[in-house]
Amino acid sequence: MNREETEMISRCQQGDQEALKEIFEKYHKKVYRIAYGVVRQREEALDVVQEVFIKLFRSVKNFKGRSHFYTYLYRMVMNTAIDHKRKAGKQFMSSLDEEGSFEPSDEAEKGPERILLQKELEERVKLAMDKLPAEQRAALIFRDVEGLSYQEMAEAMGCSIGTVMSRLHYGRKRMQDSLKDYVKLPGQSRGTSAVS
Amino acid sequence: MKNSCSSVSTVLEKYFDLEVTDEERFLVEGHLQDCPACRDALKSMEELRTLMKVPVEEAVRKEDFPWVWQKIEREIRLQKQRTWWESLRSWLDITPLFRRKVWIPAVATAAVLLFFSTQIIFKKTLSYPDVTVVEYVESQTDNVMVYQLEDPKVTVIWLFEGPEEEPTTT
């Protein structure tokens, strides 16, 4: 944690709203990535982002600086997102017509089959993620979406590096099984090619 | 094939996550040259990562975050307004003095005490509650006061002839 960030957090701990804005400027995309990774729906992810920063403003005085600030924040995001999802009780059964993640301009450039496949794939990924235990989902998002190191993940998840590796391993294995039609498994030929 | 797949598989995932030591990296890369199955395993992990990451990045790219900040700011402001009143209420709730079980009997006792104490005070100050002063004249040597008693109906003229002398009544 550099001096500038320490000072920013300290001001926020004293109730300075401008300092919170600076923290927001610095971390909002990361927070959104994790939130979206868990809930996989735009509106819900935005609600999580909002809730996290309001919560942070209230509870940042409890941050003692024993760990990195971002791992403290990521932990808060992950817990909030999982809670949010649990409360909402959504099972990711949204239809393909629901708000998509692709703009019309993007879609116009792609063929209709490709768009359908892409949306179907997104739904499949949502469902597969949803089936994972919260810890494995968290591990995959921290590593594969946010790009945290094992050490940072261990801090954010409050566990050992060995546990992090195990969660990643089993999480990936489950995801590969759920998405076997889209992801080429070792020694297998896949039914449908992945779209990226 | 320099090493068996089983000996490499334990570090393959670490290799994919860029968490290997130089020695482990050397071992995996040597093995990958001759092992299509492990190359497939790596590719599979890469595809899975792309599947999870791409929609998230798309969503981030399209989001209007200044608007999110405005919502956060507004909510904090609202909470601050609520907090003033709620903190007072919660203080009243947690302070033993203001718990209902305490303050209702306390207020009742105070009211009874106030009632009796006013009775005592007024009795002391008004020794003649039925007296009406009609006239009071004061000179350098004498003072005269005329007053009426209501019950019995009597008019009293009170003459003070000197400061040290007892008054004489008529």
Image: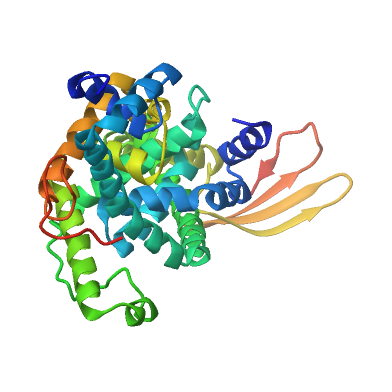
**On-image quarter of the C terminus of chain A:** bottom left
Viewer-proximal residue among B71 and B56: B56
Q: In terms of image quadrants, where is residue B31?
A: top left
**On-image quarter of the N terminus of chain A:** top right
Q: Position of residue A24 (x, y in %)?
A: 53, 51
Viewer-proximal residue among A135 and A161: A161
Q: Is residue B10 left or right of B166 when viewed as pictured? A: left
The answer, for residue A164, to whether it is visible in the render is no
Q: Position of residue B114 (x, y in %)?
A: 42, 39
User: At 50% across and 33% down in the image, what residue appears?
Assistant: A69
Q: Position of residue A76 (x, y in %)?
A: 37, 39
The furthest residue to the right: B140
Viewer-proximal residue among A153 and A168: A168
User: At 40% across and 44% down in the image, what residue appears?
Assistant: A146
Q: Position of residue B149 (x, y in %)?
A: 52, 54
Determine whether A44 is above or below A68 in the image: below
Q: Is residue B43 left or right of B147 when viewed as pictured? A: left
Q: In terms of image quadrants, where is residue B146?
A: bottom right
